Image: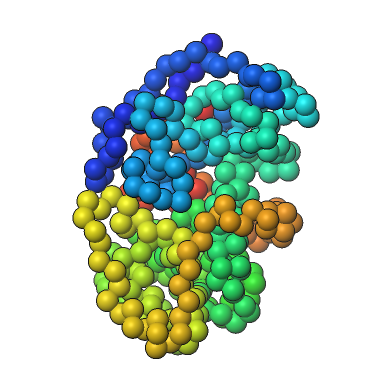
């Protein structure tokens, strides 16, 4: 059996180029003791993967050159040498960017395709969903009546942050996105109170109009101009949750920080990063609370689905461009 897998050949400088990657054919690896062989059915591509293509020290190890890249995946067990896993089981694991993966059973989590579509375990019920949940409720210390601003609000994480805030009793939820179509989606489908296209004018100006009484929480997926505008809009003892800074991922020079950081002192603001790996203890609570919202339709989600392993790289680049609405998924 032939396996196709994506390798990183060279570390991108600035925007990733196709020649930095290769789709390589290998033999399917047979599972060793305590392993399962998984035929992947859905793969995840996410903005954080850009950081793993660099050698710079970060919160996760860089991809190795000439080796298969990694990412979230869900698929079917087709061979098992692990107790508790049978052929036909479906599992979530972290060996994506390939068609087949031999996975240690301790790194595989069973999922139920009858309870929810398999792709949702990579998005709304998966890592991105838990990121939104933990970031807003634990790191952001959300409380009923807070006004919340979310950048990148039509993305997989941002769209859930805004909806969870509404379901939890936010006084006002504002989102920014990169197209008028996405702005319409935020208000008409996801229930945001206001939204704006950041390409239509200065962020601070549009945010002030959308949140005349200021904001209590800023959930940052973008950085740059958005972060500066949000710092200026945060009320006394406001909180900024830093989840991503996609505006800076392909920069080749150091990017300047916000020019109004004195506001952090004046308004006693708290700025804190969120990494989902710090919050896996919330997983049972997250599934228990969010699962029924998804099932009832109270919490809506979108997926942008790209077909074929050969298009995995283009799907990833699409995430960096903002082509996706909701979670970007590759279907094999």
- Residue 75 vertical placement versus 291 (above, below): above
- Residue 203 vertical placement versus 70 (above, below): below
- Residue 207 vertical placement versus 87 (above, below): below
User: Which quadrant holds residue 220?
Assistant: bottom left
The scheme the figure's colours follow is rainbow
**Where does the image place residue 140, in percent across and percent down from the top left?**
55, 71
**Where does the image place residue 48, in percent across and percent down from the top left?**
42, 48
Furthest residue in direction top, as rendered:
1
Residue at image location 48% in from the left, 35% down from the top:
70
**Where does the image place residue 21, in percent across and percent down from the top left?**
32, 30
- Residue 7 vertical placement versus 146 (above, below): above
- Would residue 113 be visible to someone looking at this image? no
Left or right: 257, with 113 as reference point = left
Residue at image location 63% in from the left, 79% down from the top:
144
Furthest residue in direction left, as rendered:
253
User: Which quadrant holds residue 233?
Assistant: bottom left
Residue at image location 53% in from the left, 66% down from the top:
162
Residue at image location 64% in from the left, 72% down from the top:
168
């Amino acid at each position: 059996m032939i396996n196709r897998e994506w390798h990183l050949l060279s570390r991108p400088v600035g925007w990733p180029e196709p020649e930095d990657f290769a789709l390589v054919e290998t033999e399917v690896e047979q599972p060793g003791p305590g392993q399962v062989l998984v035929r992947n059915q859905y793969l995840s591509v996410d903005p954080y993967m850009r950081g793993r293509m660099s050698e710079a020290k970060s919160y996760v190890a860089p991809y190795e050159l000439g080796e298969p890249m990694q990412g979230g995946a869900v698929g079917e067990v087709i061979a098992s040498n692990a107790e508790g896993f049978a052929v036909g089981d479906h599992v979530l694991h972290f060996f994506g960017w390939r068609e087949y993966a031999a996975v240690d059973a301790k790194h595989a989590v069973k999922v139920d395709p009858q309870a929810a579509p398999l792709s949702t375990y990579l998005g709304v019920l998966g890592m991105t969903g838990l990121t939104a949940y933990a970031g807003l409720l634990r790191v952001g210390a959300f409380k009923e009546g807070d006004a919340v601003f979310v950048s990148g609000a039509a993305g997989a994480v941002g769209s859930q942050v805004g909806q969870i805030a509404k379901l939890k009793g936010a006084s006002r939820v504002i989102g920014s996105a990169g197209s008028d179509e996405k702005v319409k989606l935020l208000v008409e489908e996801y229930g945001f109170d206001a939204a704006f296209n950041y390409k239509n004018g200065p962020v601070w100006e549009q945010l002030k109009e959308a949140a005349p009484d200021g904001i209590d929480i800023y959930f940052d997926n973008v950085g740059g101009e958005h972060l500066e505008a949000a710092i200026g809009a945060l009320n006394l003892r406001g909180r900024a949750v830093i989840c991503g800074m996609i505006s800076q991922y392909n920069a080749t020079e150091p990017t300047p920080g916000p020019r109004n950081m004195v506001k952090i002192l004046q308004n006693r603001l708290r700025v804190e990063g969120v990494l989902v790996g710090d919050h896996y203890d919330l997983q049972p609570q997250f599934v228990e609370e969010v699962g029924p919202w998804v099932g009832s339709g109270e919490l809506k989600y979108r997926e942008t689905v790209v077909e074929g392993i050969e298009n995995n790289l283009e799907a990833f680049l699409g995430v960096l461009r903002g082509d996706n609405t909701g979670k970007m998924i590759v279907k094999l």
